[in-house]
Structures are given as structure tokens and as C-alpha cells.
Image (cartoon, rainbow, N blue to C red):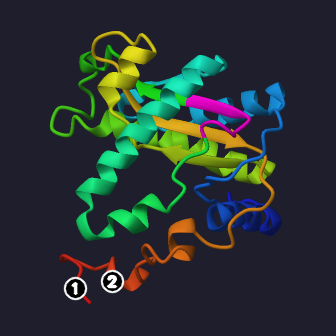
């Protein structure tokens, strides 16, 4: 007996993966609360090492907090540009976030009590972060299937963002998610369109029994 989905369902899964984009341009239309709840449900179905479920989600509805988050992102955007040296000017021309425009902004953080979880983390403590990344990817794919754009913003000082949002000691913000309606999805990743980078050929990243040979 096959446990596979139907061909139509399989195609839909692969389409969502192929057409997912890290969106930066949003309309300001509100997101249906029921739809946002579905996206959060999708995130919460993610696998987590030792079933620790280390993700915490904060919905930012206060305008002043949004402005505060935007200011932190802008501060780090400038610092990142300066660290890039000869690519500073090119980086400053990129749009890297939609905090002010998106219908919804969520901050995703690691919980403060995750050190009690040892299963799967004794030698790889970073698996808590990997688990949160899985939750974010679930949400991303669900958002694309629902026709909503989503962008993952990681340009901020985590200590300053934690302080802004009153997080307890030990909690760590890892993502500012901009979610909302878009005029169109990028035909390919924005950083490819802007000639910042290209997707690497898959066959240079896969090997058998040894480290992948460098192309």
C-alpha cells in the first residue's frame, strides 16, 4: 500500500517549495486573523529535537514597537553595509525588510528555559535553533500556499530587540517575520534578481562517502 499523497497534492507541495520567496515588498492590507492562526498552527507542527518546542511567537500590533524594531533593523543595516567593505554601496541599495508595510509582524524567539532539554542537544546544543528554523519554514511554505508573502529579517541586535520586547534572561530573538499581501511574488529570489548571489548547482553540494568536491 502506498503512503504517498495524490499526484496533485505532491505537485502542490513541490510548487510551494519552488515558489517560496523571501519577500520585502508588501501591501498594507490586514491579514485575516483566521489565516494568521493557520500559519501559526503550521509553525507549531514543526519537528523539534527532543520534542522541546523551543519556539515563541510575539505578534507586534503596537505602532511604536514596530517603529522601534524598524530602527534596530536600520541601525544594523548600516553596520552590516560598513562591514561588507567594497559591497557597501550595493548592499545599501537593497530593500532588506518590510517592517513598516507588512500587514503582520511577528518576532520569533528561543524560549528562556531550553537549557533543561538535553535530549538531542548534549553534543549539538544549537539544535534548539534548528528546531525554530523548521517552524519558520513550515510557516513560510504555508504562507506561500495561502498566497501571502513572508520575509525573514535577521538584521538586528538580538540583545537590543530582547530588551525592547521585555524578554526574560536567556530568551533569544532569532527572526522578525514580515507577513502580508503582495502585488506579486518575485519570479526568482530577490538577491538573484539584484545580482547579489546565484543559487549554487546542486551537484556541487552532494557527495557520496566523502566531502563534496569543489567545483
**Label placed on residue 146:** none
Camera-side residue of 55 and 30: 30
From the image, give the main secondary structure of the stretch colored magenta: loop
**Residue at the front extreme, as displayed:** 89
The quadrant of the image that shows the N terminus is bottom right
Which residue is label 2 attached to?
204
Q: Residue at x 28, y 16 (%)?
A: 170
Q: How many marks?
A: 2
Query: Looking at the picture, how far across and down is residue 99, in whole percent?
Result: 60, 37
**Residue at the bottom extreme, as displayed:** 215
Indicate the secondary structure of the residue bearing disc 1: loop
Place residue 9 in its image quadrant.
bottom right
Residue 213 shown left or right of residue 188 in the figure: left
Alpha carbons under labels 1 and 2: distance apart = 7 Å
Q: Is residue 100 magenta?
A: yes
Q: Which residues are magenta?
A: 99-106
Asked if 1 appears above or below 187 in the picture, the reply is above
Which residue is label 1 attached to?
214
Residue 49 shown left or right of residue 60 in the figure: left
Asked if 94 appears above or below 125 in the picture, the reply is below
Q: Residue at x 69, y 39 (%)?
A: 102
The tag earlier along the polypeptide, 1 or 2, is: 2
Q: Is residue 194 magenta?
A: no
Place residue 205 in its image quadrant.
bottom left
Camera-side residue of 34 and 176: 176
Disc 1 vs disc 2: Cβ atoms closer than 8 Å?
A: yes
Q: Is residue 92 visible?
A: yes
Asked if 99 appears above or below 65 in the picture, the reply is below
Q: Residue at x 80, y 25 (%)?
A: 33
**Residue at the left extreme, as displayed:** 123
The quadrant of the image that shows the C terminus is bottom left
Indicate the secondary structure of the residue bearing disc 2: helix
Amino acid at each position: 500500500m502506498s503512503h504517498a499523497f495524490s499526484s496533485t497534492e505532491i505537485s502542490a507541495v513541490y510548487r510551494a517549495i519552488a515558489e517560496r520567496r523571501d519577500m520585502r515588498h508588501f501591501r498594507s492590507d490586514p491579514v485575516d486573523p483566521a489565516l494568521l492562526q493557520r500559519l501559526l498552527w503550521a509553525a507549531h507542527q514543526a519537528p523539534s529535537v527532543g520534542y522541546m518546542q523551543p519556539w515563541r511567537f510575539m505578534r507586534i500590533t503596537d505602532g511604536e514597537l514596530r517603529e522601534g524594531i524598524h530602527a534596530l533593523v536600520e541601525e544594523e543595516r548600516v553596520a552590516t553595509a560598513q562591514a561588507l567593505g567594497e559591497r557597501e554601496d550595493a548592499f545599501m541599495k537593497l530593500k532588506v525588510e518590510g517592517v513598516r508595510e507588512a500587514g503582520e509582524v511577528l518576532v520569533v524567539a528561543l524560549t528562556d528555559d531550553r537549557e533543561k532539554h538535553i535530549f538531542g542537544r548534549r553534543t549539538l546544543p544549537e539544535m534548539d535553533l534548528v528546531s525554530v528554523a523548521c517552524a519558520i519554514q513550515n510557516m513560510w511554505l504555508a504562507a506561500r500556499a495561502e498566497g501571502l508573502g513572508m520575509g525573514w529579517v535577521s538584521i538586528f541586535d538580538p540583545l537590543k530587540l530582547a530588551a525592547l520586547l521585555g524578554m526574560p534572561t536567556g530568551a533569544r530573538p532569532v527572526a522578525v517575520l514580515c507577513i502580508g499581501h503582495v502585488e506579486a511574488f518575485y519570479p526568482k529570489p530577490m538577491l538573484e534578481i539584484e545580482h547579489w548571489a546565484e543559487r549554487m548547482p546542486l551537484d556541487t553540494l552532494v557527495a557520496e562517502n566523502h566531502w563534496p568536491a569543489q567545483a
